[in-house]
Image (tube, grey):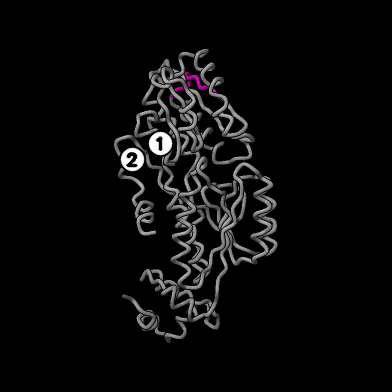
Amino acid sequence: MTTIKDIAKEANVSAGTVDRVLHDRGGVSPKTEEKIKRILKQKNFKINLIASSLAMKKHQNLATLIPQYDDENLFWKSPFLGIQKGSQEVNAYGVENHFFTFDQFDPKSYIKAFQKLIKTEPDAVIMVPLFIKETTEIIEVLNDKQIPFLFLNVGLRGFNNLCYIGQKSFEAGVLAGKLSDICLDDSEEILIILTRKNLYNYEAILERVNGFIYYFKENKPSSKIHQLQFDKPDEVEKSGKKINLYLEKHPQIKGIMVPSSRISNVCRVIDADKLSQLKAVGFDTTPQNVDALAKGVVTFLISQKSFNQGYKSVITMSNYLVHKELPKNEIPTPLEIITKENHKFSHSEERNYYQES
């Protein structure tokens, strides 16, 4: 293992000079600093985070702004657990993460949670930017206070976030289009069912829909794509009649795509005789969705490995805080196709964490 002394010997400087460069303490000429950093990069040298933090005797205050989850809205449980695992690890070297949750359907709740968060005077923020307008207001505050932040799961553009960790939503929509295409004949039509109001204020869902439509425009321009929209997710449960009537009026619809994590909720309200004729494509491996997949009700799920997203967000921001390791602008997580046949073998990291906890 390469040590500071090894780096110092190769750079022909003292170990103290290398230490000053590592901890950004100054007092080193630009030429020497550049030379040391080049050698550090070549050796892929990583300082011991625990030792570094103890040496600096500095406590770092991290804050996370993330949606709440419950039995009906389980998607956010997975990244929350990933953040929790990461937080337990970084706590050992002086980074403490505080959680602030909000109602994913209520922009006012989002703002209120942030107001509580900012009172803790965080050194950095991990946030899920669900609402564009409100996120703009939040970032104005963070920039004014010079607090670095990264985006988790939702990749809004046009902001100066340190990085984005999550799925590439447009590409995920394109993949959903391709999966739907391989299931259907050219004459068969597709229904997109949207389960969220203010779609244009919810970037990830919009991008998936755009990607899905783009796929067919580029590859099957004659395909007919229908859309049904509900103001709130729970209205899907109450509006099964509306979906079933729509399917009756359009018997050529043989595929459905739900661009959120609620494909199982939609399938649950469709009449059994109609459902058996449909190929269903959805997103995210919530327990309800996986159960529907295992039963053959859902044909494909696209997973964004959200547990890993949460974990990586904490490690990435902690590395930045402790030893100024600047991350890439984007850290995309894989687009994983989950089927009835392979669902038991996916998400091993998350399962292992459950077993360890």
Question: Percent x, y for residue 279?
Answer: 40, 25
**Residue 126 lies in what quarter of the image?**
bottom right
Nearer to me, 142 or 354: 354
* Image quadrant where residue 252 sits: top left
Residue 352 sits in which quadrant? Answer: bottom left
Q: Quadrant of the C terminus?
A: bottom left
Question: Was residue 225 drawn as part of the magenta stretch in this picture?
Answer: yes
Q: 136 or 105, which lies in front?
A: 105
Badge 2 vs badge 1, beta-carbon distance below 8 Å: yes
First in sequence: mark 2 vs mark 1:
1
Q: What crowding class fits label 2: few (fewer than 14 Cα within 10 Å), some (14-19), or many (20 or more)?
A: some
The structure residue drawn at horizontal position 38% and vertical position 79%, both measured from the top left corner, is 7
Task: Give the side of residue 236 with respect to residue 187, left or right.
Answer: right
Residue identifier under label 2: 343
160 lies above or below 247: below
* Kind of residue indicated by mark 2: His
Instruction: Give left or right: position of 155 versus 331.
Output: right
User: Which residues lie in the magenta part?
Assistant: 220-227
Counting from the top left corner in percent of width and height, residue 5 is at 37, 83
Distance of mark 2 from mark 1, alpha carbons? Answer: 9 Å
Disc sitting over residue 216 in the figure: none
Task: Count up the numbered dots.
Answer: 2
Which residue is rendered at x = 51% and y = 18% of the image? 244
Whether 21 is drawn above or below 297: the answer is below
Q: Three-letter amino acid code at disc 1?
A: Leu
Q: Residue at x 65, y 67 (%)?
A: 121
Residue 283: where, in percent of width, then height? 45, 37
Q: Determine crowd level at label 1: few under 14, some 14-19, many 20+ residues with C-alpha closer than 10 A.
A: many
